[in-house]
Image (cartoon, rainbow, N blue to C red):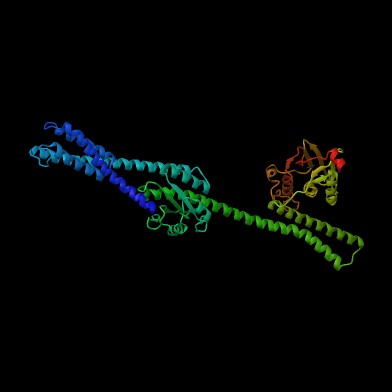
């Protein structure tokens, strides 16, 4: 309220200053012209006064210009038209000249002032058009709600020397309330209740009047075709320009359209994500149900046979073996799901220790002996390879998934080759097979979650290779895949790791 009174007082002072300026200028002109006055030259004085009135009309308002015209006529009569120092005019031609002077001075001042006001109006319209043009151009170049707000603030500040603030909705037609600490720390206090009222009315001419709030901020609704993005709050130094509702309606419509475009874009993305998530959920649910049903059916069938029928010892051992293999498969599926959950949540933690690669690969091949029995497994590990530092349990899972993948895709009786190298501080694992390899367009997706090659006959959830990548990256390593020239696929793992030196070996 104090600020409004100060601005009002400043406006009054400015008008009073103009009237005083008129008095001072006319007085000064009179004093300058008095020595030049004579019965033969008083007509020339009128032209000087005409010029002074026209000059004042270029800079002052209509009121001061009218005062200047009247005062110049009175001064010319009193000081320069014979008889001097009286308002009486003796000669008839002087009376006509005085009347003409007064009318011409008045018209000259008014018309000059009108021309100036039209010039100002044209300049304002040009500035407004330029501001709209630049705003539209800048908004067309950006995307994202934050970027739209930033551009709108910058353009507004550049053209109108004012501040622009946004209170946007949350997607459910309810404004997001600014945090209390943001309001406290900011120089501008945003009235959330007033903004909500403006937002609910959604009227283009609905803004905060001076008597509606003690703030000098104007609250303007952002209205769109399909949704209303929120409320815009602004202030500026030019009080008259704040009242140009038609311009602000057009100006803020550009901002509202840009925000609405981004809101609808985000809603479309969310809808697409929800649709894809629902599709993925159904696919995953069906896949998991199918993969779990196979080992469970084996376990239930073998168990039912053992419980309900008499059979030979050999048949019992075969059934026990089927139950064990089905349990292992079921356990592998569950382990993959748990490992993927840990990787995504970031809860998986490394426990590196000194390991012998021969022990690691022997442990993996022993667990996969049933699968590897139909293949020629060749391992090539340097005899002088020292102990390396890595997480034994996690790397066992990595090699298990890779070798199992080769067993599922390589033809029976083909070779599966495993090679280990240590170069430049990196431990390299290379696993290759003689299978069909991967389609070229599938190679970039091999390590994606739930990805399976089309028309693949092998079972699984499509998590094995994704888990491999996650565990390797947790070791700060890399894993790559390529198709071999002779057929089949080759996986290459590179792990930065230390090797045990002789001094450390002696200490151990």
Looking at the image, residue 436 sits to the left or right of residue 313; the answer is: left
Whether residue 380 is visible here, answered yes or no, is no
Between residue 3 and residue 441, name the one nearer to us.
3
Residue lying at 87% horizontally and 67% vertically, measured from the top left = 309
Coordinates of residue 421 in the picture (x, y in percent): 81, 38
Is 326 left, or right, of 105 in this rendering?
right
* Residue 328 placement, left or right of 449: right
- The quarter of the picture where the C terminus appears is top right
**Residue 483 location in percent, x, y?**
74, 40
Q: Quadrant of the N terminus?
A: bottom left
In the rendered view, tell whether residue 100 sits above or below residue 270. Answer: above
Locate residue 307: give its quadrant: bottom right
294 shown above or below 244: below
Task: Please tell me which residue lies in front, 52 or 375.
Answer: 52
Q: Residue at x 12, y 42 (%)?
A: 87
77 shown above or below 7: above
Q: Quadrant of residue 280?
A: bottom right
Q: Is residue 340 left or right of residue 216?
A: right
> Of 72 and 139, which appears nearest the observer?
72
- Viewer-proximal residue, 369 or 113? 113
Q: Residue furthest bottom?
A: 308
x and y percent of residue 114 in the render? 26, 42
Task: Name the residue: 40% across, 48% down.
Answer: 250
Relative image position of residue 162 (x, y in whole percent): 42, 46
Asked if residue 43 can be seen in this view, the reply is yes
Residue at screen point 37% across, 46% down: 238
């Amino acid at each position: 309220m104090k600020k409004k009174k100060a601005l009002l007082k400043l406006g009054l002072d400015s008008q009073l200053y103009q009237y005083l300026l008129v008095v001072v200028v006319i007085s000064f002109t009179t004093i300058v012209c008095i020595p030049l006055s004579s019965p033969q030259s008083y007509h020339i004085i009128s032209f000087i006064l005409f010029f002074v009135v026209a000059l004042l009309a270029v800079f002052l308002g209509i009121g001061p210009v009218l005062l200047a015209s009247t005062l110049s006529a009175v001064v010319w009569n009193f000081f320069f038209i014979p008889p001097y120092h009286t308002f009486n005019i003796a000669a008839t031609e002087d009376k006509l000249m005085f009347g003409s002077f007064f009318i011409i001075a008045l018209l000259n001042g008014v018309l000059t002032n009108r021309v100036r006001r039209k010039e100002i109006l044209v300049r304002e319209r040009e500035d407004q058009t330029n501001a709209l043009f630049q705003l539209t151009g800048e908004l067309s170049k950006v995307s994202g709600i934050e970027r739209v707000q930033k551009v709108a603030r910058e353009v507004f500040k550049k053209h109108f020397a004012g501040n622009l603030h946004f209170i946007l909705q949350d997607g459910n037609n309810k404004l997001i309330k600014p945090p209390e600490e943001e309001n406290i720390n900011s120089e501008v206090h945003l009235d959330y209740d007033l903004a909500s009222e403006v937002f609910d009315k959604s009227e283009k001419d609905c803004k905060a009047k001076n008597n509606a709030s003690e703030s000098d901020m104007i609250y303007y609704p952002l209205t769109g075709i399909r949704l209303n993005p929120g409320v815009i709050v602004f202030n500026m130094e030019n009080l008259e320009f704040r009242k140009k509702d038609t311009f602000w309606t057009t100006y803020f419509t550009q901002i509202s359209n840009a925000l609405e475009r981004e809101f609808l874009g985000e809603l479309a993305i969310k809808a697409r994500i929800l649709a894809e998530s629902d599709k993925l959920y159904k696919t995953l649910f069906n896949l998991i149900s199918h993969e779990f049903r196979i080992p469970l059916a084996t376990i239930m069938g073998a168990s039912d046979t053992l419980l309900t029928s008499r059979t030979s010892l050999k048949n019992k051992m075969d059934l026990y073996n089927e139950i064990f293999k089905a349990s292992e498969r079921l356990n592998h599926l569950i382990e993959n799901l748990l490992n993927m959950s840990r990787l995504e949540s970031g809860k998986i933690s490394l426990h590196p220790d000194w390991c012998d690669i021969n022990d690691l690969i022997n442990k993996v091949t022993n667990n996969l002996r049933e699968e590897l029995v139909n293949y020629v497994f060749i391992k090539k590990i340097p005899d002088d390879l020292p102990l390396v530092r890595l997480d034994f349990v996690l790397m066992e899972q990595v090699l298990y998934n890779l070798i199992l993948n080769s067993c599922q895709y390589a033809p029976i009786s083909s070779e599966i080759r495993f090679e280990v190298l240590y170069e430049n501080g990196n431990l390299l694992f290379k696993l290759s097979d003689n299978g069909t390899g991967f389609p070229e367009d599938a190679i970039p997706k091999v390590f994606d979650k739930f990805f399976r090659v089309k028309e693949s006959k092998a079972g699984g959830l499509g998590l094995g290779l994704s888990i491999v990548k996650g565990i390797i990256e947790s070791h700060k390593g890399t894993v790559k895949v390529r198709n071999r020239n002779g057929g089949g696929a080759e996986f290459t793992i590179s792990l930065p790791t230390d090797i045990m030196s002789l001094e450390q070996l002696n200490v151990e």
